[in-house]
Image: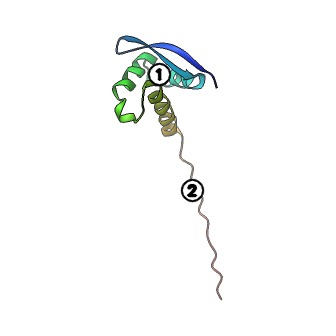
Amino acid sequence: MPKKVRNVCVAGKRTSMRLESAFWDALAEIARREKVTVSALCTRLADELDSLSAGGLSSAVRVYVMEYFRAATPKPEVARCEIAIAAE
């Protein structure tokens, strides 16, 4: 999947990030849900870069997007399988 380079303001400074289109779309969706701008969200991520265990801001965005939507996804119920034990 080709990556797109876009400019965002992080802490008031313009910077470029290269992300796949799906991540740009997801980042915009999260910003809408959280009622912040993409730049504000990226600034927050840049401030938390060390705690996200990611190398750079682009990687931090990918990790954050994955964790955000993973947390929003309902957990599947674990099916219980009864095991019948044959009596000898």
Sequence-wise, the earlier of marks 1 and 2 is: 1
On screen, residue 46 versus residue 29, left or right, reads left
- Residue to which mark 1 is pinned: 31
In the rendered structure, which amino acid carries the disc numbered 1? Ala
Who is closer to the viewer here, 67 or 36? 67
> For residue 53, which quarter of the picture?
top left
Q: Quadrant where the C terminus lies?
A: bottom right
Identify the mark at residue 78; answer none if there is no mark. 2
Which residue shows up at 40% across the image and 18% down it? 40
Q: Quadrant where the N terminus lies?
A: top right
> For residue 79, which quarter of the picture?
bottom right
Gap between marks 1 and 2 measured at Cα: 32 Å
Residue 5 screen position, x and y as percent: 54, 15
Which residue shows up at 53% across the image and 47% down it? 75
Residue 17 screen position, x and y as percent: 48, 18
Indicate whether 34 appears above or below 80: above
Disc 1 crowd rating (10 Å Cα; few below 14, some 14-19, many 20+) is some
In the rendered structure, which amino acid carries the disc numbered 2? Val
Which residue shows up at 56% across the image and 53% down it? 77
On screen, residue 85 versus residue 54, left or right, reads right
Identify the mark at residue 15; answer none if there is no mark. none
Disc 2 crowd rating (10 Å Cα; few below 14, some 14-19, many 20+) is few
Who is closer to the viewer here, 78 or 50? 50
**Dot 1 lies on which element?**
helix
